């Protein structure tokens, strides 16, 4: 099957505020960069300078032909001091979502994508005593300000990644290595998700509010080793299933504990899945199999995992699925079109109600602790000049959108000559 149709899934692209906007702000990430914790020494102050280039980027979105755009908000801009909102920053976001709507593009807004204002970091961040009240105030304000144009929301992006990298591995802010605090932060994020879900529905009854959870396919490194099998199931539960259950249903199973006041219910209108890779498990540390196709960051490229992840999510939590992120780090655009083809083919054929697919990322972006190195964009970014250039994979994506699927000609032109590298062939594998 060279070509295929995508009749039931609408395509878009995704971004996050800290990764594209730029700006000299006081956030947890600007502080983390200032303390020398980014691989290439960069900071989010440059990024794609999107804050000053909204019109140019909107033209590129239209060139891609996307009908959907997932974007984030930078809390530190709109509330630079506790309880003090910046009218200009809010107006900027209002203008942006209004312009998207005018261009026929539906915004899906993430309230929190790993980013906290500095004043909240000083107050203990996610585990500080003021977090829930502060999040509620910020979320209510932004939903009220933007609801004339926005009715699709994600309260919190990837609580599991934030908790694991920031509180277990210590490689993201706040740089902690504590299992009890990892569990606590998952619990608090799930509680805040539920409170935000309820608050948005009270303000905007017709809104669609969902998750954006990072899902991994977990597999025992050696399937006949019982330790590997057990570790794989434990990782799966601890990393994703427990927190997704808590957020989606208000049922907190061990090791999580239900916060008082949370009532079991249904707290999602769509299940958002960010799917990238598979882990090969021997113990609790993350691992990759050898001899498998990989991207520039060494992540296994495993398209079947998209279906595996969406299938169990759908069985556990029925309803629409949005693929809120999927993409790959590929500096030379050597295999992104094949990656797109292979993952969209899963969407086209797996029979699951995947209503949306948001490719990560719209443009090359500042990739957290990895800095400016990894290249995830459909649009190439020259960080020095801020020049944007459509990649061939971007042209392929535009062609898929224009045709409602992959034509045989598009497959021939963009996909047929592309191949993945295996991690046995690359020096850092
Ligand atoms: C996801 C994040 C997103 C981006 C991609 C590559 O975990 O949500 O911001 O960094 O990975």
Image (cartoon, grey):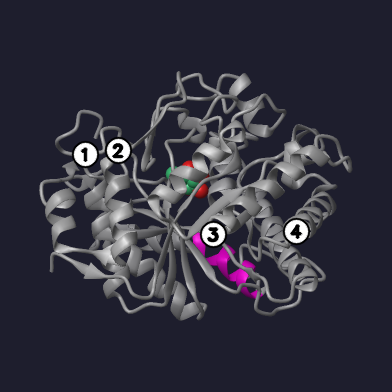
Dot 2: element: loop
Main SS category, magenta section: helix
Specify the quadrant of the image occupied by residue 44.
top right
Q: Which residues are drawn in magenta?
A: 240-249
Figure check: 257 above or below 340? below
Residue under pointer 1: 334
N-terminal of the pair, mark 2 or mark 3, is 3
N-terminal of the pair, mark 4 or mark 3, is 4
Residue under pointer 2: 330
Kindly give the residue lying farthest to the front in the view shown.
102
Figure check: 292 above or below 408? above
Q: Residue at x 67, y 60 (%)?
A: 149
Q: Is mark 4 within 8 Å of ligand 1?
A: no
Q: Position of residue 221 (x, y in %)?
A: 27, 54
Q: In the shown orientation, is residue 331 left or right of residue 80?
A: left
Q: CA distance from mark 3 to mark 1?
A: 28 Å
Q: CA distance from mark 4 to mark 3?
A: 18 Å
Judge the density around disc 2: few (<14), some (14-19), many (≥20) Cα neighbours within 10 Å: some
Identify the mark at residue 143; answer none if there is no mark: 4
Circles 2 and 1: CB atoms closer than 8 Å: yes
Residue under pointer 3: 212
């Amino acid at each position: 099957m060279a070509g295929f149709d995508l009749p039931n899934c609408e395509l878009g692209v995704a971004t996050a505020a800290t990764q594209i906007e730029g700006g000299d702000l006081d956030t947890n990430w600007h502080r983390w960069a200032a303390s020398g914790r980014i691989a290439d020494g960069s900071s989010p102050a440059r990024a794609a300078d999107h804050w000053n280039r909204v019109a140019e980027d909107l033209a590129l979105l239209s060139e891609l032909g996307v009908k959907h755009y997932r974007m984030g908000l930078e809390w530190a801009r709109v509330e630079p001091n506790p309880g003090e909102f910046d009218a200009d920053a809010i107006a900027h976001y209002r203008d942006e979502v209004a312009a998207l709507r005018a261009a026929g593009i539906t915004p899906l807004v993430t309230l929190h994508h790993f980013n906290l204002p500095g004043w909240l970091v000083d107050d203990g961040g996610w585990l500080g005593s003021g977090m829930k009240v502060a999040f509620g105030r910020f979320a209510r304000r932004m939903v009220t300000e933007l609801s004339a144009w926005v009715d699709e929301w994600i309260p919190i992006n990837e609580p599991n990644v934030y908790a694991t990298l920031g509180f277990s591995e210590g490689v993201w802010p706040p740089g902690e290595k504590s299992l009890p605090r990892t569990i606590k932060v998952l619990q608090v994020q799930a509680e805040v998700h539920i409170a935000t879900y309820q608050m948005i529905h009270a303000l905007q009854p017709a809104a669609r509010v969902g998750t954006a959870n990072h899902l991994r396919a977990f597999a025992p490194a050696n399937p006949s080793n019982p330790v590997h099998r057990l570790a794989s199931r434990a990782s799966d539960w601890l990393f994703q299933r427990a927190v997704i259950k808590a957020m989606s249903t208000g049922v907190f199973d061990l090791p999580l504990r239900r916060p008082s006041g949370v009532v079991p219910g249904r707290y999602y209108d769509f299940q958002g899945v960010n799917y990238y890779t598979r882990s090969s498990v021997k113990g609790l540390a993350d691992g990759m199999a050898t001899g498998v196709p990989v991207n520039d960051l060494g992540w296994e490229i495993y398209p079947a995992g998209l279906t595996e992840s969406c299938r169990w999510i759908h069985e556990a939590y029925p309803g629409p699925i949005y693929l809120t992120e999927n993409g790959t780090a590929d500096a030379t655009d050597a295999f992104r079109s094949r990656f797109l083809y292979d993952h969209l083919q899963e969407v086209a054929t797996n029979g699951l109600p995947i209503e949306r697919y948001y490719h990560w990322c719209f443009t090359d972006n500042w990739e957290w602790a990895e800095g400016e190195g990894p290249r995830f964009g459909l649009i190439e970014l020259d960080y020095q000049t801020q020049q944007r250039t459509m990649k061939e994979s971007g042209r392929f994506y535009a062609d898929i959108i224009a045709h409602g699927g992959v034509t045989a000609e598009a497959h021939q032109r963009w996909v047929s000559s592309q191949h993945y590298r295996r991690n046995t062939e690359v020096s850092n594998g």
